[in-house]
Image (cartoon, coloured by chain):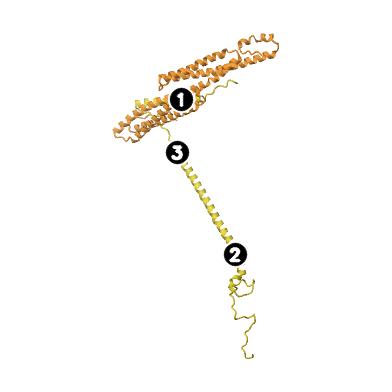
Amino acid sequence: MDNQAPAQPTSPVTPPAQPVTPPTATPPASAAPAQPAAPAGNSAPSGDAKKKSSPMKVLVMLLVLALVIGGGVFGYQWYMNKQKSDEMYQAAYRAKQAVPTSTPSPVPPVTSGDAEIDQQSDVIDQSMKKLDSDVSNVDSGLKDQSVDLNQ
Amino acid sequence: MTLVASPAFAVERPALDSLHSGSNGAGMKEQRNEKISGNLQARADKEITRRLESLQKLITRINEFKKLSAAQKTALTTQVQAQITSLTALQAKIKADTDPATLKTDVQSIIGSYRIYALFMPQIQILGAADRLLTTADEMSSHAATLETKINEAQAKGQNVTDLQTLLADMNAKVTDAKTQGQNAINAVTPLTPDGYPGNKTILQSARQMVVMGIKDLNTARQDARKVIVGLMKFGKIESKPTATPTP
């Protein structure tokens, strides 16, 4: 039994033959000692991390979404207000421009020097004055009220 | 209770009062009634006089109408004259009324007859305005014909009269529209009767608006005519003498 090959060291401290999981695949050193890679069905520490990061991602995405939607709404409102104010300004400008041209001054009476034309013009002018008086009489007739004789 | 309204009886009242109970209360009440009746008679007289004067002016106005036929004028005059006769008789009766109850009834009949007066006044005034509108439109048509002759003369001499012809066409169109408005106003108010009170008022207002529209047409036509005259003056055909009275 003495000439037998030395037995393989069995110390659990130095197991050179066993594969060591790379440091990148293990959780932080403070969390657990180095262990061989476990089968897929037995990875509890990695699942917790994913569970923690998922709500964060969702939160961030929601935040970004809210910012995008809020920005869109704000931009739309700003655009509409601008359109409205531009229209009002343009309308006001147009109205201001239209004032001088919308009321042409009446042509005063003219004497042509032609007897027939001037005589006709005079007759028409007198008739127009009487017409204005007629309309005043019509208005007074329509407004006429009976005196209250019961007082 | 004895109510005495007439001044004729008022002289005898003290004697009557002394024959009755002798109390001064009844006499004072009768004096008060007399005063009220007297005031009522005065107010009624004033109102009837006002209406009679207005109706008399209507007859004068009807006689001035040029576009209405003689039969239409006679019919209108007859209606107004009948109202004058009725009111004159009522005025005399009210003056002679001695019974307060009768006086009150007679005064109320003034108000009852108001619908006749309320129709005649605006109806005939609108007819008068429409009549003058048509007459003035005819005058403008003659004026337009004269101006057309002048324009044609200028054109024959090689002047560019395109603008003047445009103005003349507008003038003629406005005169035509004014005639339509005037005739429509006459057609609207002629068939109205006092029975249609107060619904007549809407038609009267509408007819009044037609007359106003017609006057606006004639004002535009007159402006066109003046522009044509000024245009002709630029050709050197006629001399210009602007008058001092501007028109609105």
- Residue nearest the observer in this picture, A75 or A126: A75
Residue located 53% across and 54% down the image:
A72
Q: Which chain is orange?
A: B
In terms of secondary structure, where does tag 1 sit? helix
Q: Chain of mark 1?
A: B
Give the residue at mark 3.
A100
The image quarter containing residue B247 is: top left
In the figure, is residue B28 to the left or right of B87?
right
Q: Chain of mark 3?
A: A
Chain A: drawing colour? yellow
Q: Chain of mark 2?
A: A
The answer to whether residue B49 of the structure is visible from this angle is yes
The image quarter containing residue B9 is: top right
Which quadrant: the N terminus of chain B? top right
User: Which is more N-terminal, label 3 or label 2?
Assistant: 2
- Image location (x, y in percent) of residue A33: 64, 74
Which quadrant: the C terminus of chain B? top left
- Image location (x, y in percent) of residue B143: 36, 27
Give the residue at mark 1.
B189
Single out the mark in the foreground, 2 or 3. 2
* CA distance for labels 1 and 3: 41 Å
User: Which amino acid, by three-letter code, is at mark 3?
Assistant: Pro
User: Which amino acid, by three-letter code, is at mark 1?
Assistant: Val
Q: Is residue B201 above or below residue B102?
A: below
In the figure, is residue A41 to the left or right of B67?
right
What is the number of the mark on residue A53? 2
